[in-house]
Image (cartoon, helix red, strand yellow):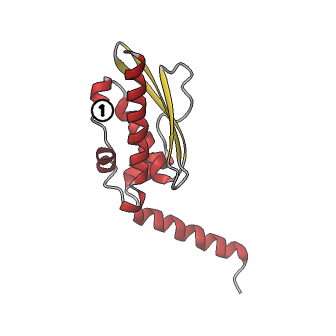
Amino acid sequence: MASRSAYARQFRRLGIAILLLMFSDAVLDHFQNPRNAGELPSASSKVEVSNPVCGDVLQLAVRIEKDRIIEARFLCRGCTTSIACASLLTEQLRGRTLTEARSITSQSLSQSLGDLPTATFHGAELAADALQTLVRNIAANYR
């Protein structure tokens, strides 16, 4: 009879194998090595959005100078793709104007990560929702 630790090792290996089959290298890289994770104390704007269905929560913060996003950071409590999409989003935001940032969509994030499976596409939608909310809030404050 196998020990509990042997079952645990087999389960861990199986879990890793499933992740490798389910997600692209880009998704796994952004998940395992998230870029720009953490607080942004000097943020020009910060928003928090959530997905009530799965419970994922994403906080997105940016610092803007001379109409360009010069820094973006995120905090995310969520699944693999939510973290990966938030990481990618912060990379794509740097150096863009708000008008340019509007071109980032859930589809473009998914494509950049190797086309997310339908079951995990909500991670891209969460990131896009955070961006849209952020842009709306900034535009409302500059009117």
Q: Amino acid at mark 1?
A: Arg
Going 32% across and 25% down the picture, which residue do you hit?
98
Going 47% across and 67% down the picture, which residue do you hit?
18
Q: Helix, strand, or loop for circle 1?
A: loop
Let me know if residue 123 appears in the view. Answer: yes
**On the picture, is 62 further left or further right than 75?**
left
Residue placed under numbered mark 1 in the picture? 102
Q: Is residue 92 above or below residue 64?
A: below
**On the picture, is 51 further left or further right than 97?**
right
User: Which quarter of the rendering shows the C terminus?
Assistant: top left
The percent coordinates of residue 59 (x first, y second) are 52, 36
Q: Quadrant of residue 116?
A: bottom left
Let me know if residue 88 appears in the view. Answer: no
Q: Closest to the observer: 30 or 79? A: 79
Q: Closest to the observer: 111 or 58? A: 58
The percent coordinates of residue 42 (x first, y second) are 53, 18
